[in-house]
Amino acid sequence: MVLGSLSRLSQPPRQVWRRGSQGFGNQRRAAKAVAAVFHEVGKPFELQEVPLPEKLNEGELLVRMEVATICGSDLHTVSGKRQEPMPLVLGHEGVGVIERIGSDIFSGSRPRHRGWKLQEGDRVTFSVADSCGVCPECTLHKLPQKCVSLMKYGHARMSEGTGLNGTYATHVLLRPGTHAVKVPDTLSSRVCSPANCALATVVNALDMARLPRYGSNKSAVVQGVGLLGIYAVAWLKKRVGMDSVFCLDTQPERLKTAVQFGGIPLLVSGGEEEFWERQRSIRERYPHGVDVAVEMTGAKGVIHEGVQLLRNGGHYSFAGMVHPDSQLSALTGETIIKKCLTIRGVHNYTPWNLEEAVKFLNEYREELPLESVLSPSSYALSQINDAFAEAFSGSYCRVVVNCQDI
Ligand SMILES: [Zn+2]
Ligand SMILES: [Zn+2]
């Protein structure tokens, strides 16, 4: 049943966030979920009732969503830059509470079974990818996010399964191959919400085991400081222990945030002279170049600069150019060979990256200004169109949605 179309752009967000699961713990179980359904580009979201399954299948988890955050890929879908099967429930970042558990979920060899025992009432986040756990990608290649029968939350049509496949809803149904990670009591759902897309991808891009093992590992360049870039700065400073993380971006506001996380800002406004000036300022401190470069801009033009700035034996992580307009014409094989570079493409992440991400947030929740990347107020699910308008304005890295406020 369609509950109504929403376009109250003028209403201020309501102050509705409640810490942890306490706010919803005593709620009576509903027979129906409410989901914000996206039908087509140019139309507002519609709240729609979706029946909850009477009985869960083995390995399934019914999660009552607490908060969701609006990721850039959802903005691309809503604006028509990205194609998704419609209608669907968008949203893949979020935290919720396990309301029901399917039977026998700890038998078998699916990724989730390595973890601790999950219980009803546990607050969790979960991997955006649901994987089979048995194909070569899942097992041999350690790339469950490339599973041959992959399903991704927030990217699946309403007609698939229960339809509750996205986080802009009161409930999401997690499938048996989805890795759920318990959120520590000390970590708020708001701060944890972007962990299962933005931060886990950063953890993968800057996997400690893959960064340079020889020579120094003290300096990096982060190209593009949207939320992934901001988290990359935090990870490189805190987890890797780097001395200097140079941040390159075209937007002064983003650079200000990067500074709060420990980055050294370098504004990019274009031009050859400025390019060489940046090279000079970094090489004053690191004459042989930096150890690590991370591409998180999505712009193919930045590759030349990243390669120039890397030292011999440096590591270049590509994470932003997830679109076809990414021909690397400025890069020569000769440069890669002569500088002995490692270039690694990163798409999404693995269950263990997500566990690391949650651990990292909890460990540094008091040292890092993690709330500063979020909208100060949470929007009600019934204000999802307003929340998207806010997200499109770019005022915050992430706009927060309270999924139980309908
Ligand atoms: Zn698989
Ligand atoms: Zn995302």
Image: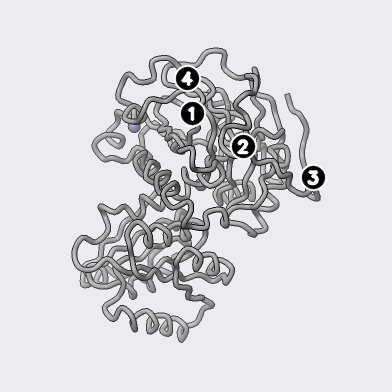
- Category of crowding for the residue at label 1, using alpha-carbon neighbours closer than 10 angstroms: few (below 14), some (14–19), many (at least 20): some
Q: CA distance from mark 1 to mark 4?
A: 11 Å
Residue that carries the numbered disc 4 in the rendered image: 101
- CB-based contact (under 8 Å), mark 3 and mark 4: no
The spot of residue 403 in percent (x, y) is 64, 35
- Category of crowding for the residue at label 3, using alpha-carbon neighbours closer than 10 angstroms: few (below 14), some (14–19), many (at least 20): few
- Amino acid carrying mark 1 in the image: Asp
Residue that carries the numbered disc 1 in the rendered image: 122
Height in image: 330 above or below 144? below
- CB-based contact (under 8 Å), mark 1 and mark 3: no
Label 3 element class: loop
Label 4 element class: strand
Residue that carries the numbered disc 2 in the rendered image: 168
Height in image: 139 above or below 252? above
First in sequence: mark 3 vs mark 2: 3
The spot of residue 136 in percent (x, y) is 27, 34
Label 2 element class: loop
First in sequence: mark 3 vs mark 4: 3
Q: Residue at x 45, y 72 (%)?
A: 264
- Amino acid carrying mark 2 in the image: Tyr
